[in-house]
Amino acid sequence: MKKNHDNKFKTPEGYFESFNERLMARLADEEASQSSSIPKNDGFAVPDGYFENVYSSVQKRMDGKGTKVIALKSYRAFYYAAAAIAALFVLSLAWNWSNPTQLGFEDLASTDITAYLENNDLGLSSYEIAEIVDLEEVTILDIVENQLEEDVILDYLDENVEEIEDLNLEYDEIQ
Amino acid sequence: MIVEETLVAELKDKHTQAKAFEVLVNAYKERLYWHIRRIVLDHDDADDVLQNTFIKVYRNIDGFKGESKLYSWMYRIATNESLTFLNQKSKKLGITNQELQETLVENLESDVYFEGDAIQLKLQKALATLPEKQKLVFTMKYFQEMKYEEISEILETSVGGLKASYHLAVKKIESYLTGAD
C-alpha cells in the first residue's frame, strides 16, 4: 500500500469505512426534513369491507343491476334521442311563435342544436362521444357552418400567406 | 404475481374472460381506487368512477395493443374517467373547475370517510390550488410512491417535465402549509 508521505493529517479510525453509511443517513435526514411540513398520510378512509365488494359491485353494474346503470352499448341511440329531443324542443318553440308552416329538421339552426348539446348534460363524456363518432367520415363542411365564399378565401390567403409557392398549388389551380 | 401478457390474453378470450376479469379487478382495485379518490376526493364518487373504469377496461380490452403496460393503460383510463367526472360535475353545478375543487375540499370537513386532521385538511386546500397536472404528479409521486418512469407512461409526459412539475408542486404546498392562515 502506497503511503502518503506529504500528508501529516490523520482521520479517526474507520472514518472512510463508515463514510458511505453516514452520507446516506445524512441524505435521508435532509430529505425527511425537507418534506416534513407535508404529511405523509392524506387522511382518506373507506367504509369497512369496501374493497371486498368492489368486484360484485362492478359485476352488478355490468349486469344492469347496479344503482347507477350505464348502458355502454346504447350510446348511438342515446345520441340520436338527444338530437331528436333537441329537434322537438326547438320545433315546438318555432311552432308557437310563427305561422304554422311545415318545419323540418333542416330548419333548425345548428347553433340551437349545439347550444342544447352544450347546456344539457347527456351523461356522455367527450371520451365516450369520441368512441361513437367516426372522424374519418367528418368533412370540413360538417364543422364549418357556411360554405366559404371564394372572395373570403382569397382575402384570407392574401392576409395570411406571404409566398404563394408555400401553398404547393398546381399551375391550373392558380388560374 | 400476475403475468400481464397471460392476463390480457385471458381477458380477450371469451371462455376465460370472466375469471380473468375477476383476477384483474381484485389485483388493481385498491391502487386504482386510491388514485381516483385523490382526484375526486369523495368516496362515493371514487367508487362510481372506479366501477366505470373497470367496465371500460373490460369493454375495450380488445383495443389494448400492449404498447404500454396494462396497469399504465388502466391508470390512464382511470385518470381520464376521474377528470371527465369532475368536468361533468362542475358543468352540472354551473361552476368552474377551480370552484368545484374548493367545494370538494370544504365538503371533506363533514365527510365521514375523511379522517384527516387540520394539517391534512390544509394539505387538501393546498392541493386544490395547484394546476391539474402538478396535482396529479404530486399525488402519484408522493402518496402512491410511483417512479417517474411509471408516471411518464401514464401521463404521457417526459420524466424531466414530471420532475419539474413535482418540484414546483412541493414548493407551492410547503409554502402554503408553512404560510400564515
Image (tube, grey):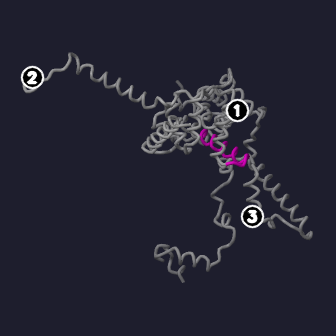
Looking at the rendered structure, the kind of residue marked 3 is Ser
Residue B172 screen position, x and y as percent: 49, 40
Residue A80 screen position, x and y as percent: 78, 53
As measured in the structure, the alpha-carbon distance from the residue carrying label 1 to the one carrying label 2 is 71 Å
Q: Which residue is mark 1?
A: B44
Q: Chain of mark 1?
A: B
Which residue: 75% across, 64% down? A110
Q: Is residue A106 above or below residue A15?
A: below
**SS class of the residue under badge 3?**
helix
* Residue range corresponding to the magenta coloring: B77-95
Question: How dense is the environment of label 3, judged by Cα within 10 Å: few (below 14), some, or many (20 and up)?
Answer: few
Question: How dense is the environment of label 2, judged by Cα within 10 Å: few (below 14), some, or many (20 and up)?
Answer: few
Asked if disc 3 and disc 1 are in contact, CB closer than 8 Å, the reply is no
Residue A100 shows in the view:
yes
Residue B152 shows in the view:
no
Mark in front: 3 vs 1: 1
Q: Which residue is mark 2?
A: A3
As measured in the structure, the alpha-carbon distance from the residue carrying label 2 to the one carrying label 3 is 90 Å
- Tell me which numbered mark, 2 or 3, is placed earlier along the sequence: 2
The foreground one among B60 and B26 is B26
Q: Quadrant of residue B181?
A: top right
Looking at the rendered structure, the kind of residue marked 2 is Lys
Q: Are marks 3 and 1 on the same chain?
A: no
Q: Which residue is mark 3?
A: A110
Looking at the rendered structure, the kind of residue marked 1 is Asp
The foreground one among B120 and A107 is B120
**SS class of the residue under badge 1?**
helix
Residue at the far right in the pictured view: A100
Q: In the drawing, does residue A126 fall left or right of residue A156? A: right
